[in-house]
Amino acid sequence: MAEGLSDYANYELGEAFFEIVSKMVIADGIPFNKIGDFEIVSPSWRKLANKPDKTPDEIKQIDNDYKIEIRDLADSCMIYMAAKTGNKTYKISLEEYKAFLAQTATNKVAIPNDKIELEQYNKKIEIQFKKIANHGEESGDNLIDNKDMAAYIYALDMKSEHDENNNFTGFILNGKITPMNYAVAYRELKEDVDNLFSLKLRHAYKNLFM
């Protein structure tokens, strides 16, 4: 196993993640609701999380185990991306990211032939890449590594909560990526503005690594 990656990370899990979430959108961020959710967490984690009257130690364990499972999945994604791009540093550049999207069909928009449309396509992919690579910050190293991928997966699980007056009260995590979660992220990642998913990426990175 590569230095710094989880011993439990594996190619097959990374492949499954990308293949399943890629089926969650039809086009332009429209969700395909006939496909099921992607379970980030293990059954044992969910069993403990659903337990009533949890002790403080159990609550701490739930948080710690969640972060471990997120990192295992993120590291698996990096192994898969490295295999597809031939990059064994596990730090993916923009050009490698474009090649990865093109060969794995994780981007639902076909690569256009028209020059102007191709420029627009590449611009959107670059915006998406930078948001993930820099975990929602305005600038960074412009390389996707396992920490950036972990923040991305964590952000995909973040659901907004509202009170009885529909006022935003915060985010919740339930260990599932739904087609709607993914479709919204799919659209917002390509928007050249600081939007809700940018905020989620920043929040996710801080929660995981700061």
Image: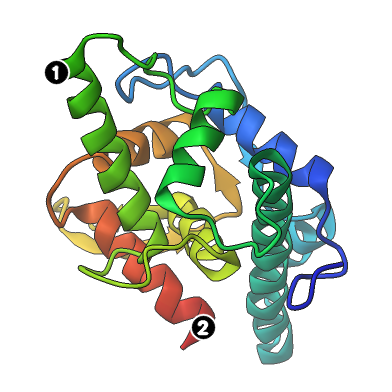
- Which is more toward the observer, 91 or 127? 91
**Residues at circles 1 and 2 in contact by the CB criterion of under 8 Å:** no
Tell me the kind of residue under disc 2: Phe
- The secondary structure type at the circle numbered 1 is helix
**123 in relation to 51, above or below:** above
Q: Quadrant of the N terminus?
A: bottom right
In the rendered structure, the answer to whether residue 10 lies left or right of residue 111 reads right
> From this viewpoint, is residue 160 visible?
no
Which residue is at the front of the view, 131 or 91? 91
Quadrant hosting residue 200: bottom left
Residue 77 lies, with reference to residue 100, above or below; the image says below
Residue 76 percent across, percent down from the top left: 73, 54
The residue singled out by tag 1 in the image is 116
Q: Name the image quarter holding residue 22.
A: top right
- Residue at 39%, 52% in the rendered image: 159
120 is higher (above) or lower (below) than 126: above
Q: Look at 65% across and 53% down and name the residue there.
A: 87
Amino acid type at circle 1 is: Ile
Q: Which residue is mark 2?
A: 209
SS class, disc 2: helix
Query: For the point 64% across and 58% down, which residue is it?
Result: 74
Label 1 to label 2, Cα distance in Å? 40 Å
Tell me which numbered mark, 1 or 2, is placed earlier along the sequence.
1
